[in-house]
Image (spheres, rainbow, N blue to C red):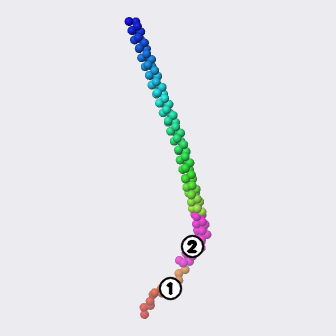
Amino acid sequence: MTSQSQGIQQLLQAEKRAKDKLEEAKKRKGKRLKQAKEEAIAEIDHYRLQREKEFRNKQTNVMGSQGNLSTKIEEQTTETIRNLTSSYHKNMESMMKKLLSSICDINPEVHPNFRHAV
């Protein structure tokens, strides 16, 4: 009986060791999965940052040229406004004189199409 009991004890111990090894393997697998997930997330983040940087560079190149056009247009508009203001101040007085003279100097004349009733 003792040999049977020892055999049973050995089987139980072997089963316990196998169970422990199985638990340990499951833990290692879980750790490895977690580590792989973290590595994948890190790689994805690195790739995303790289692509965003490339996008920003391209966007800067495109928007930079548009920004230059915008600046040039603003400068031209400012220059045009300055020229018009200067022209206004220079010609205002002479135009006012012409306008007032045409309004105030009235020469009554008979219209050429008017027929005398005789």
For the residues bearing labels 1 and 2, Cβ distance under 8 angstroms: no
Choose between 106 and 50: the one closer to the eye.
50
Corner quadrant of residue 72: bottom right
Choose between 62 and 39: the one closer to the eye.
39
Residue 70 is situated, as x and y percent measured from the top left of the image, at: 56, 57
Calculate the distance from the C-alpha at mark 1 to the C-alpha at mark 2: 25 Å
Residue bearing the label numbered 2: 96
* Amino acid residing under circle 2: Met
Image quarter hosting the C terminus: bottom left
Give the residue displayed 47% in from the left and 30% down from the top: 33
Residue bearing the label numbered 1: 109
Q: Which residues are magenta?
A: 80-104
Question: Which disc, if any, is residue 54?
Answer: none
* SS state under label 1: loop
* Amino acid residing under circle 1: Glu
Residue 58 is situated, as x and y percent measured from the top left of the image, at: 55, 50
Q: Residues within 10 Å of mark 2 (few under 14, many from 20)?
A: few
Is 62 within the magenta? no
Give the residue displayed 52% in from the left and 37% down from the top: 43
